Amino acid sequence: MEQLKRKILGHTTVVEAELNAFLSSFEPIQLAKGEYLSKADQYVQHMYFLQKGCVCFYTIYEAREQVVEFFVENDLFTDLYSYLREAPSKCFLKTLEPCTILAISKKAFEETLRESHELEHFLRLYLEEEYLNVFVNSTNKNALSNEERYLRLLRKRPNLFQRVPQYLIASYLGLTPVGLSKIRKRLSQS
């Protein structure tokens, strides 16, 4: 809980009683590697905070996994489309490592936001950050070369390369595993 508390206080100030009430609404979840938080066609009714581990957010496109994002420690996440639209998900949330996750139901989350302007401010900042990440990733897939995307990921999130299988990193970058291997080989020879 301390990690989540620090994350919130890093974005906004909130009365301690409101913060403690909010934090008490979270339930801990322990998942082994390879387990699902949610699958396509399910309704996502929780917001999650990852205390420990790594989660892959992906969809199936043309019979292949297409990675949308990786979540690691201190990430607040959900399938925003399903969560906000109350629609069946088109994606999967699957653990890549054993995970310790805090989950809060949409109902409890929204009740808290109605009662606390500071926590509502925190959520707005979170949603802005998520939108910007999606925008930047989408723009980069169109504007940067394969090698530039790889180098950018290596620079911004180097820990992923020790934690995530290469075929998933390739998918995240919009590459084939062979294409990623060629880029890595070419760069190692430079």
Image: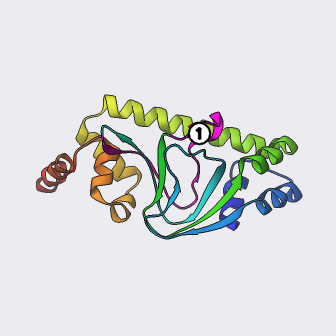
Can see residue 164?
yes
**Magenta run includes residue 75:** yes
Q: What stretch is highlighted in magenta?
A: 63-89
Relative to 108, say whether 63 is above or below.
above
Mark 1 residue element: helix
* Residue 129 shows in the view: no
Question: Circle 1 sits on which residue?
Answer: 82
Residue 9, given in percent of the width and then of the height, sits at: 73, 54
| Residue 80 point in image, percent of width and height | 58, 40
User: Which of the 4 quarters of the picture holds residue 165?
Assistant: bottom left
From the viewer's perspective, tell me whether residue 134 is left or right of residue 167. right
Residue located farthest toward the front when viewing the structure as drawn: 41
Q: Residue 50, percent across and down? A: 58, 60
How packed mark 1 is, by other alpha carbons closer than 10 Å (few <14, some 14-19, many 20 or more), is many
Image point (30%, 44%), residue name: 64
- Is residue 123 shown left or right of residue 183? right
Question: Which image quadrant is residue 141 in?
Answer: top left
Q: Which residue is depicted at the point 32% across and 53% down?
A: 168
Residue situated furthest left in the rendering: 189
> Up-down: is 108 above or below 16?
above
Q: Within the magenta stretch, is there residue 86?
A: yes
